[in-house]
Image: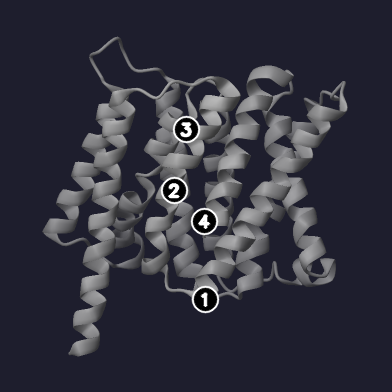
Amino acid sequence: MCLAVICFSTLDSTAKYLGEFSGVNVMQVLWMRFIIHTLVLFVLYKPVQCINALKSSTPKAQIIRTLAMIGATAFNFVALKYLQLDQTITIFFLSPLLIAALSGPILGEYLKPKQLYAVVFGFIGVLIVMRPGFGGIHWAVILSLLATLSLSIYNVLTRYTAHKDSNTTNQVYAPIGGALLLAPFALLNWQTPDNIFTWVLLLSLGVSGGLGHWLLITAHRYAPAPLLAPFIYIGIITMPVIGYFVFDDQITIYTLFGAIVVISSGLYLWYDEIKQKKSQRSA
């Protein structure tokens, strides 16, 4: 799980670097993330097995799930061009709270009052980071929030399809779908990189993204989700460190305090879920 978070931190920082310094079109960056991820899957599994895995018992859910992943990646890549890594990761930490909130209407798993308070408390943490009324909110924050919402929808639908489709189907649908849907837009706006370093960064997008998702799924194969959930918060270490050394980002006290509030909310939900499971087992 920790290695998965490191992979995703590498993915985001690479996308930010390409967006700021390479001059490569964002649509091209987005497509490379999915097409290389697809090729990684073809290495891990046989290509025929990947194509056959597209046969799903929940095609509508898989299509919406794929669109949610594309949206999450697109919104995030554009937001990263304008925001610091520590800001985007703090907003991303809303994901466990949004997943808890969305599980009600989608999965029928509604929040209890105390859990709802934790979600609201988490949103207050993001407001601390954004500081509305103190010099204005950068418009890219809206994109980061949309990315987090899209990712939360993707995760909730993954929980739904996990009980109806195979692990292979859940792994291949989003990357293959993203590669196919984005190909026309990327190829029409294609800008051939003029140096090897940019090519290496573009190729690494799919590797870090694909490897990160494989590690994430493997981690959940060996340990329950509630036990793994808190480990996503090591991103508050990896992202600011990368931001400081690569982009010279300076962490503000507002971002740090807001992150503490958001993480505290997520940890409370995690603790409450663990406590419920223990009480159910004892009963």
Question: What's the amino acid at mark 1?
Answer: Tyr
Q: Counting residues from the N terminus, which is met first, the one under dot 2 or under dot 4?
A: 4
Q: Counting residues from the N terminus, which is met first, the one under dot 1 or under dot 4?
A: 4
Contact between marks 2 and 3 (CB within 8 A): the answer is no
Q: Quadrant of residue 279?
A: bottom left
Question: What's the amino acid at mark 4?
Answer: Cys
What distance separates the C-alpha of mark 1 from that of mark 3? 29 Å
Task: Check disc 2 and report the residue beneath it.
Answer: 234
What distance separates the C-alpha of mark 1 from that of mark 4? 14 Å
Find numbered disc 4 in the image and state the secondary structure of the residue it sits on.
helix
| Callout 1 crowding tier (Cα within 10 Å): few <14, some 14–19, many ≥20 | few
| Callout 2 crowding tier (Cα within 10 Å): few <14, some 14–19, many ≥20 | some
Q: Nearer the viewer, residue 121 or 13?
A: 13
Question: What's the amino acid at mark 3?
Answer: Pro
Residue 222, disc: 1
Q: Counting residues from the N terminus, which is met first, the one under dot 1 or under dot 3?
A: 1
Find numbered disc 3 in the image and state the secondary structure of the residue it sits on.
helix
